[in-house]
Image (cartoon, grey):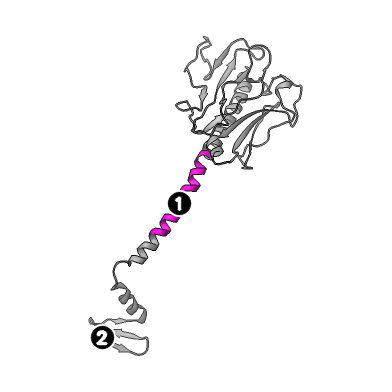
Amino acid sequence: MAHHGRCGAFEGPSGRDLRCGSFFAVLRAGRSGFTLLEIAVTLVIIAILTAIGFSSLKSFVPRYRLIQASKELQEDLMNLRMTAIDSNRETRLLLTGADEDWAVVTTDSSGSWELQAGNRPLLSNRWDTFPLDLEGDGTDDAQGEGAVDISRGGLRSRRGVSLVPWATIEGPGNSNDDSIVFSPRGWVTNPADDFDEDGYITLTLVNKIGLAEGVDDHVKVQVSRAGMVRLQSSLGHDLGGGSAGTGTATTEGT
C-alpha cells in the first residue's frame, strides 16, 4: 500500500485510494468481539437500569389500578346523572360492600356497588339494575351488567384496591340507605345530613399495596349537591376530575 502525502490518499491493493478516516476504519473493522471487561460493564449497567425500572414499575402499577378504579366510579356516577336527565327517572348508586379491613396491609381488594334506575321521577318504589328495562316488564334485560365488584374475580377486579367504609348515607325517602340518588334534573336528592361540612358525599378508594410501603395513597370521589363529581388524590395527582359543582350543601332537591 503506497502513501501519497500527509493524511492524504492511500493506494490499496486494488489500486483504490483510501483516506485517513477510511484507513482507521479498516483497522477498527479488523477487530472482532468484545473484551471481558466491556461485557462485565455492560451487564452491570443493564442490571442497574433493570432494578431501577422494576422498582418504579412495582409502585406504579398499584397506583395505576387505584386511579383507574376511581375514574370508573366517577364515570358510573356521571352516567347515573345523565341517565336520570335523559330518561326522566330517578337513578341511584347503591353501595353494597366495603373493605372493613382496608387498613390491613394485604393485596386483597373489596368494594361493590350497583347502578340502578327508579320507576318514577321521584320517590321510586322499584329499582332496575342497569341496563334499563327497555320492555317495561320489570325484569333486567341483562343481569349483572350494572353490578360492579372490584374484589378478586369481580366485574372490575382491581388487585390491592379497596373501597373504604363510607360515612352514614341515609338517602332520600324510604329504602334508599347507602344510596346516592339523582333526580331527573341531575341534582342529588339525598338529605343534607348525608353531605359533609364541605358539601360533598365522599367515597374513598385506597391503594392497599401502597400502605405496605408506608405510602398513604388514596383517592376521594366527591359528589356535590349539583350532581357533579370530582377526584381528589392524597398524593396531589391531577386526575382530571374537574369541578364538583357547589362548594356547600344546599337544600334544593328535585
Which residue is at 47% across, 50% downward?
53
Residue 200 at x, y percent in the picture: 70, 28
Q: Is residue 6 left or right of residue 116?
A: left
What residue is pinned by disc 2? 1
User: Is 65 rendered above or below residue 9?
Assistant: above
First reached walking from the N terminus: tag 1 or tag 2: 2
Side (left or right) of 187 relative to 24:
right
Image quadrant assignment for residue 104: top right
State if disc 2 and disc 1 touch (CB < 8 Å).
no
Part of the protein shown in magenta: 43-62
Number of labels in the image equals 2
Q: Secondary structure at mark 2?
A: loop
Q: Position of residue 177 (x, y in %)?
A: 64, 16
Frontmost residue, 23 versus 99 = 99
Between 203 and 165, which is closer to the camera in this rendering? 165
Q: Is residue 107 above or below residue 30?
A: above
**Would you say the magenta stretch is mainly helix, strand or loop?**
helix
Magenta-span inclusion, residue 55 = yes
Foreground disc of the pair 1, 2 = 1
Residue occupied by mark 1: 51
